Image (tube, rainbow, N blue to C red):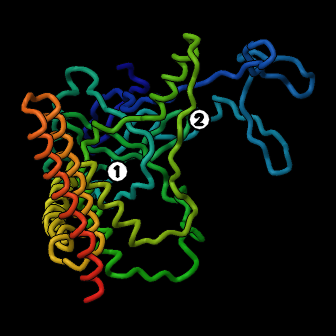
Amino acid sequence: MRSIWNGAISFGLVSIPIKLVNATENHSIHFRQIHLADGGRIRYRKVCELDEEEVSGGEIGKAYEDADGTMIPITDEDLAQLPLPTAKTIEIVAFVPADEIDPLQMDAAYYLSANGVPAAKPYTLLREALKRSNKVAVAKYALRGRERLGMLRVVDDVIAMHGLLWPDEIRAPEGVAPDSDVTVRDAELDLADALMDTLGEVDMDSLHDDYREAVEELIAAKASGEAVQPSESEDSGGGKVIDLIAALESSVRAAKKSRGEGEAESEEDMADVHPIKKKATPRKTAPQKSSPKSTGGKKSTASTAKKTTQKKTTSKSTSSASSSKGTSSANSAKKQTSSGSRSTTKKKTAAPRKRASA
């Protein structure tokens, strides 16, 4: 990795030559401005306001604008003459517990690399001292024309430095908290705790930028001439007044389902449903067997008897027509048919008598 700054760590009377290397990188996708009419790129040019002519980099200096608009030129020589002991030195001023550093002060992160063989021993000494003390070092350093505050800590076997904002650069959170008094019930806190426990921990290496991947897919699709289908965005419900308890309960269920914990619950729910279905089955068939006074049941019995008699008559007549026994078998079929019709007539007449008696 390319170093961006060379200097030394000042650890009391110990000096540790180091190189400063960026510990982070930006993966954001950058766009260019273009002219919509012809697709030409739009560029910014540095133009002097007085003569409206473009100025090259060698002709540009720096100045401080006073309150009345007056420009006060400041040269690099002016800045170089200022007493700045941290110009090439990371000066450690204290060792404090890590929890005394407000995360709001965290800024850019760097790795400190030992510069040369002689720096290996004091570098390792400082690293091991930080490990054993469980503390971090607070230091001052100068970078890009200004003095800054930093925090040194150990990452694996490397000393890392986090740039810190000065305490007076942190704004007080005035007017940010809700204005009205809000009471949180114990039940809501319990559900919030349950949601936190369900979500649990996460492997930070598994997190990635979904939006950047979507932008990359969009660029690839448009470059290949494919049609881009708009994706349906889910309604996050922002700005809506919600039932907090219901929202927390739904969140817990969704978190369990996403982690595979909801499958066991769904199986239990299915097991609870089966006994109810088994008990409901005899209740539906019971009225047909146990209520002899039902008119519908008698009608269905009579119609069944009719169909049975018709089938017997048809089968008997067919067999008598194809057989060679003559009229005797035909007469017996007629007798059976007439007896069947008489029995059917008796059943029809019996039904109203029972209804009358009832």
- For the residues labelled 2 and 1, the Cα–Cα distance comes to 26 Å
The percent coordinates of residue 52 (x first, y second) are 90, 22
What residue lies at 13% left-to-right and 52% top-to-bottom?
A: 336
**Residue at image location 26% in from the left, 52% down from the top:** 257
Relative placement, left or right, of 53 versus 208 is right
Q: Which mark is residue 138?
A: 1
Specify whether residue 193 is in view: yes
Q: Is 250 situated left or right of 228 in this image? A: left
- Kind of residue at disc 2: Gln
Q: Quadrant of residue 117?
A: top left
Name the residue type under label 1: Val
As drawn, 184 above or below 210: below
Q: Quadrant of the C terminus?
A: bottom left
Q: Is residue 21 left or right of residue 14?
A: right
Q: Earlier in the sequence, mark 2 or mark 1?
A: 2
Q: Nearer the viewer, residue 150 or 172?
A: 172
Q: Secondary structure at mark 2?
A: loop
Tell me if I can see residue 297 in this picture: no
State the image coordinates of residue 253 (x, y, percent, origin top left): 29, 59
Q: Quadrant of residue 77?
A: top right
Q: Nearer the viewer, residue 31 or 83?
A: 31
Point out residue 295 in the picture as x, y percentages from the top left corner: 29, 74
Considering the image in quadrants, where does the N terminus appear?
Answer: top left
Residue at point 36% right, 62% down?
250
Return the residue at label 2: 81
Q: Nearer the viewer, residue 306 or 214?
A: 306
Which residue is rendered at x = 42% and y = 27% of the image?
5
